[in-house]
Amino acid sequence: MRGLYASGVRFVSDSFDLVVIGAGSGGVRAARIAATYGARVAIVEEYRVGGTCVIRGCVPKKLFVYASRYKDLFEIAPSFGWDVGTPSFDWATLVANKDKEIARLEAAYVAGLEKPGAEIIRDRATVTGPHSVKLQKSGRELTAGTILVATGAHPFIPDIPGKELAITSNEAFHLEQLPHSILIEGGGFISVEFATIFSGLGVNTTIVYRGDKLLRGFDEDLRTGLEAGLEARGVKIIHQTNVLGLRQTGDDVTVSFSDGIDAPFGAVMFATGRSPNTSGLGLEAVGVELEEDGAIAVDEYSQSSVPSIYAVGDVTNRAQLTPIAIREGHAFADTVFGDRPTAVDHSLIGEAVFSEPEVGTVGLSEHDAATHGDIDVYVTRFRPMINTLSLKSDRMMMKLITRADGGEVLGVHVLGPGAAEIIQMAAIPMGMKATKADFDRAIAMHPTAAEELVTFKKPSYVYRAGVKQP
Ligand code: NDP
């Protein structure tokens, strides 16, 4: 009896096959597919439909990255004969246009939910039992055959004096004006992507990272090349240093660093990881087991320790990536409502970092591959063609790692223009356990950068018994 109107008052049932908490990437996909299977679905969201990715994550971030890349394009334009005068940038226009696009996408998400009959409830939900959910604003109690928690994660902020003076990526999307300078703490995805954005838009940008090289866990050549590329664009990188405290000094925020130095910045941003949104949901009270960091513990079908309660996406401790949340949400709906038990394979996940230079990676890093037996490594570095008419000296790096003597491809790593697009395609043969010979069978498309991956002749070097040899 959903969606019926009686005497102008919307009459709704409080009984559903599925109640989803959180209308982000994972929750929306699960709700839509479950509804398509004929389930009566409600999806509860306290903020905006679309979640972090659409509203204040991947999508607006990439729009900002595009905006920041014009700086490079304007620099090389004269080498192609263009006279672009003195380019100027208006932050307010970018933010307004980005907001328009996000509103359009949000409307598309709403339509995608409503079409198969899912009910969108704008409220905050608390789980009150294995089959019950209470809505805070309306006081309404919902019963559900199955509950799916897809509440995502929020920025983690280190507990230091003055932390309230800092922003996170959430606020970065709505700054009233660009600061004259920014310090970004952290050496992961968000830090390097926002350093790219801010520096490209003319903000004096510094990264402070507690480790010795950005993007811990990535292939070493990607890490080294990324740092060099960021520094070439004017980003200052401070290693092995932490922020100990912040204080307001006039319009600036003065930062006390762990090396004893104090310095003022127009803004300070934390990009120090994201924590699962589980507090205040009532999960522990109904017996849902949480991990140490608050994430919901789930099995390969996304089922929690309470059989009727499932969880997908960043609220679980798998991979904090939108396509993974979507895949998990879809697999959940197939399993519970489509009579098709589906476990998500998390073993081969390509990753893209939309920094400048861009990073794309799939499979094992050189370091990890060398611990999996004998391997061959093919590496090339070259000047991307778009820069050849200018003085721009950026290099592109492509690396292919195979088992010894032309065996299975174990890793592909790309740094430079189009890295993410190239890696998306490389992930397909890798999933099929392609060998070097399979890559070589592809006719090279010329002139492209990706052709390098199918034209490597001899390994640049090899590892035998874990030892690097020329
Ligand atoms: P990341 O986990 O990528 O990076 C967090 C960084 O903060 C690390 O460098 C970490 O250091 C550092 N850090 C953690 N805690 C502290 C602390 N207490 N003090 C100082 N430094 C600290 O998280 P992000 O916030 O960058 O991004 C969150 C998640 O969002 C990512 O894991 C990613 O999965 C996802 N994301 C994906 C994107 C994409 O696919 N392009 C884009 C943006 C986000 P250390 O290395 O030593 O641990």
Image (cartoon, helix red, strand yellow):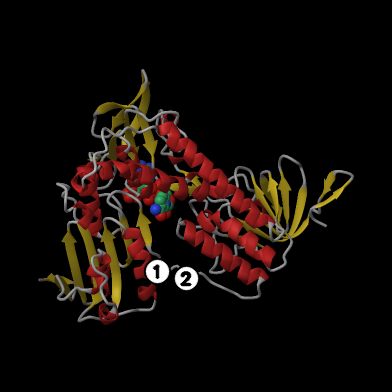
Q: Categorize mark 1 by other alpha carbons within 10 Å: few (<14), some (14-19), many (20+).
A: few
Residue 441 in picture, x, y percent from top left: 27, 81
Residue 316 visible in the picture: yes
Q: Residue at point 70% right, 57% down?
A: 118
Q: Residue at point 30% right, 29% down?
A: 256
**What amino acid type is highlighted by mark number 1?**
Leu
Q: Is residue 243 above or below residue 351?
A: above
| Residue 293 left/right relative to 73 | right
Residue 21 in picture, x, y percent from top left: 64, 52
Q: Categorize mark 2 by other alpha carbons within 10 Å: few (<14), some (14-19), many (20+).
A: few
Residue 329 in picture, x, y percent from top left: 57, 62
Q: Residue at point 17% right, 53% down?
A: 388
Q: Is residue 164 above or below residue 372?
A: above
- Farthest top residue in view: 250
Number of callouts: 2
Residue 196 visible in the picture: no
Compare residues 84 and 1 and report the one nearer the observer. 84
- Farthest right residue in view: 7
In this figure, which residue is indicated by the disc labeled 1? 348
Residue 421 in picture, x, y percent from top left: 36, 61
Q: Secondary structure at mark 2?
A: loop
Marks 1 and 2, Cα distance to the nearest angstrom?
Answer: 7 Å
- Farthest left residue in view: 470
Pointers 1 and 2 in contact (C-beta within 8 Å): yes
In this figure, which residue is indicated by the disc labeled 2? 345
Name the quarter where the N terminus is drawn.
bottom right
Name the quarter where the C terminus is drawn.
bottom left
**What amino acid type is highlighted by mark number 2?**
Asp
